[in-house]
């Protein structure tokens, strides 16, 4: 047997021995490694790389959040600054719009003071009234610059609860005048384009009342006739301790002249203050008329 044959036998023996060892046993040192798994150092390297990637991602997201907060604070500062500028512009615009009105009001105050210093005791009521009426166009012009318009209802118009306020009721024997305007005590004021007035017009409204039938026999009672034909106007203040009953409305200056049919004396129905009452007779009203 030659040397080459001996070496071939040794190699064959080592092959057979390795074939008989358990799978995963390393030849020569007797160590065993699990089949199909990576080495421990390779697994540790993979975990390290994964942790490094996650740390980088967290740092990136933290930067995004910080930039978002910075941008939000910047936008909030801009919004606050723009709001202050808008308020300043509004105040300036309001002042510019009101400047002509303020100037006219100041001029009106100066003229009123000048006129009051020139009043004399010998001035008649008509002269004083004309002097006051001279300021009416000035006041109306000031209201017009503010967008306020005045309106005056027509005598004979149907009473409107939205644009008018009944400050007095007057009995009328004519049914066609029921709930119609007899006099205008004060005009109304409304903003241009508005549906409801700022201040309704104050009017006197008629209320139809049938005349009582004449007695069958005997002359009329003079005292009763005097009570029906002589209107009583109680000028006692409402809070006066001597007030005997509800205060009667004082005859105001009227813008319009009542119809000819109503020139006959009538006894106004009393009502408390300047509040309009429902258009229906009541025992209290009748007792107040006899008081």
Image (cartoon, grey):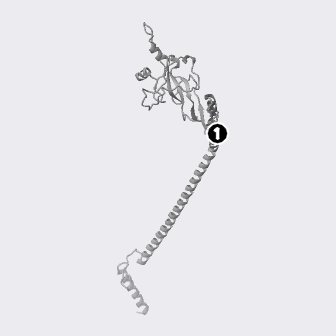
Identified at 50% across, 17% down, the residue is 175
Q: In the rendering, at what x and y percent does residue 119 appear? A: 63, 35
- Residue appearing at x 43%, y 91% in the figure: 4
Against 55, residue 127 (above or below) is above
Question: Residue at horizontal 49%, vertical 68%?
Answer: 59
Task: Between residue 175 and residue 227, name the one nearer to us.
Answer: 227
Q: Give the residue furthest to the bottom.
A: 2
The front one of 103 and 129 is 129
* Mark 1 closeness class: few <14, some 14–19, many ≥20 residues within 10 Å: few
The answer to whether residue 211 shows anywhere in this view is: no
Q: Residue furthest front?
A: 121
Residue 27 is drawn in which quadrant?
bottom left
Name the foreground residue: 161 vs 220.
Answer: 220
Q: In which quarter of the image is residue 20?
A: bottom left
Q: Helix, strand or loop at disc 1?
A: helix
Q: In which quarter of the image is the N terminus?
A: bottom left
Residue 51 visible in the current orientation: yes
At 60% across and 34% down in the image, what residue appears? 149
User: Which x, y percent locates residue 78?
Assistant: 57, 57
Image: 229 above or below 273: above
**124 horizontally vs 284: left or right:** right
Residue 163 picture location, percent across and down: 54, 30
Q: Position of residue 15 (x, y in %)?
A: 39, 83
Looking at the image, which is closer to me, 112 or 191? Answer: 112
Q: Name the residue under label 1.
A: 114
Q: Quadrant of the C terminus?
A: top left
């Amino acid at each position: 047997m030659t040397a080459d044959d001996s070496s071939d036998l040794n190699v064959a023996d080592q092959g057979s021995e390795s074939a008989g060892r358990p799978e995963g046993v390393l030849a020569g040192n007797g160590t065993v490694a699990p089949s199909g798994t990576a080495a421990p150092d390779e697994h540790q390297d993979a975990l390290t790389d994964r942790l490094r990637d996650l740390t980088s991602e967290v740092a990136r997201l933290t930067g995004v959040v910080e930039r978002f907060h910075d941008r939000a604070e910047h936008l909030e500062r801009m919004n606050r600054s723009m709001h202050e500028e808008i308020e300043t512009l509004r105040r300036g615009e309001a002042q510019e719009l009101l400047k002509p009105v303020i100037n006219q009001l100041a001029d009106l105050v100066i003229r009123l003071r000048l006129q009051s210093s020139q009043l004399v005791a010998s001035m008649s009521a008509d002269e004083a009234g004309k002097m006051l009426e001279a300021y009416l166009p000035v006041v109306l012009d000031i209201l017009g610059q503010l967008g306020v318009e005045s309106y005056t209802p027509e005598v004979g118009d149907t009473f409107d609860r939205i644009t008018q306020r009944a400050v007095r009721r007057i009995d009328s024997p004519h049914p066609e005048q029921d709930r119609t305007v007899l006099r205008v005590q004060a005009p109304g004021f409304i903003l241009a384009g508005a549906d409801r007035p700022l201040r309704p017009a104050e009017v006197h409204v008629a209320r139809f009342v049938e005349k009582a039938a004449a007695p069958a026999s005997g002359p009329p009672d003079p005292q009763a006739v005097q009570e029906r034909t002589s209107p009583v106007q109680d000028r006692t203040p409402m809070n006066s301790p001597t007030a005997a009953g509800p205060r009667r409305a004082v005859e105001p200056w009227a813008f319009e002249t009542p119809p000819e049919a109503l020139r006959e004396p009538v006894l106004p129905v009393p009502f408390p203050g300047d509040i309009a009452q429902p258009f229906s007779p009541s025992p209290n009203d009748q007792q107040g008329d006899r008081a």
